[in-house]
Image (cartoon, rainbow, N blue to C red):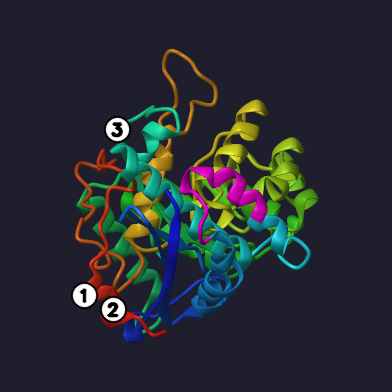
Amino acid sequence: MKITGVTTYVLEELLKDKAFGWSQWVTDRRQTALCVISTDEGIEGVGEAFYIGGPAKIAAGMISDAYAPLIIGKDPFDNAVIWDFLYNRTRDQGRKGLPISALSAIDIALWDIKGKAKGLPIYKLLGGAYREKAHVYATGLYEPQHVPSVKDALVEEALGYKKDGFSAMKLKIGYGIETDMEYLKAVREAIGDDMVLMVDANHAYNAAEAIRLARKMEKYDVYWFEEPVPPEDIDGYIEVKQKSNILITGGECEFTRYGFRELITRRAVDILQPDLCGTGGFTEIMKIVAMASAWNVPVIPHVWGTNVGLAASLQLFAVLPHFPERRFPAKPFFEYDRSPHPFRNKVTHEKFIMKDGYLDIPDRPGLGITLDMDFVSKRTII
Ligand SMILES: [Mg+2]
């Protein structure tokens, strides 16, 4: 089989009155870059590039201008060879960020093709599923922009997740220790002690601030404290981890096996959170997972995108091993982004619906999804 074409789609929609804040800025739009790879056998694969702040059209440009010309004529089953080849071509000015997100989209599309060609879900090609469904936690509880009281709005949103059947949710923090504690107290008291509650600072603090906050948060039974310090500050992570009784997590801003090497080998986090659509796709993340398993650091992937990234992440979630293997292994949570996204669930014909706190992991070939091309074409801005 040979690759015959690569097409990119950049989708964007403004959030208007649903714009939401977090510790770094106010997100006023949702964007994504999708990539469709076609082959001479008529099989197509789709991938998504993770983006937070860099415009999605830059990732799409990397795909179409830097990578696509280099993979025409190659066999999708040579995905690992293709990965190293493409990485090396952008190594001098790439290595992290959007070039790797773009490479991730290509790699995910190649695995989609491989699965469809073999009639198997990707998790089968990766060695088989440890689980058939994903126990989810709600990612939300950002800072709404057009409400009389942020605290009241957070409480209402948190109660909504509880009512919907979630057993866990994640609160955004990083607005300053006093404000963080006010929001945390309000949410914890509203949802009760039975719900699992995580917090995420999106690297808003230095180590000293994060330690002070972690100690204050302990009484509210916070399950994990995500990205307390900037991703470059590995020593800060280690300091916070050593002085906090709350689990410390991070990794959504890290890339490739090279980037994760230090986080893993220096035991900088309690739980590693690579993003499949950002860190290099299936080919690369399985190398990160293998390294993490050797150091016995649990992996719980970061997930933030449309149904394409969600479907891909569910395939990955199926194959995550136990850390460690045992008679009664821990049941990892799957990140289920519930923050405003006008087209997350519209880009594919298949819909993902939570039932009793779980999402089913599709057992259809490849990613198990088909793009709704009518919708995708209409929303494409370039
Ligand atoms: Mg996060």
Residue at horizontal 67 percent and vertical 45 percent from the top: 257
Q: In the image, is 354 to the left or to the right of 178? A: left
Residue 194 visible (yes or no): no
Q: In the image, is 215 to the left or to the right of 130? A: right
Q: In the image, is 258 to the left or to the right of 140? A: right
Image quadrant assignment for residue 161: bottom left
Residue 44 is labelled as none
Residue at the top extreme, as displayed: 327
Q: Is residue 237 above or below residue 24?
A: above
Task: Estimate the x, y position of residue 150 in percent, counting from the top left.
Answer: 40, 74
Q: Residues within 10 Å of mark 3 (few under 14, many from 20)?
A: some
- Beta carbon at label 2 within 8 Å of ligand 1: no
Helix, strand or loop for disc 3 = loop
- Beta carbon at label 3 within 8 Å of ligand 1: no
Q: Main secondary structure of the magenta part?
A: helix
Q: Which residues are magenta?
A: 72-85
User: From mark 2 to mark 3, how far is it between C-alphas?
Assistant: 33 Å
Residue 132 is labelled as 3
- Residue tagged 2: 377
Q: Is residue 142 above or below residue 242?
A: below
Task: Estimate the x, y position of residue 358 in percent, counting from the top left.
Answer: 27, 41
Q: The residue under label 2 is which amino acid type?
A: Ser
Say whether disc 2 or disc 3 marks the residue closer to the N-terminus. 3
- Residue tagged 1: 374
Q: In the image, is 313 to the left or to the right of 160? A: right
Q: Are marks 1 and 2 in contact (CB under 8 Å)?
A: yes
Image quadrant assignment for residue 341: bottom left
Residue at horizontal 68 percent and vertical 63 percent from the top: 205
Q: Are marks 3 and 1 in contact (CB under 8 Å)?
A: no
Q: The residue under label 1 is which amino acid type?
A: Asp
Helix, strand or loop for disc 2 = helix
Q: Please identify the quadrant where the C terminus is shown.
A: bottom left
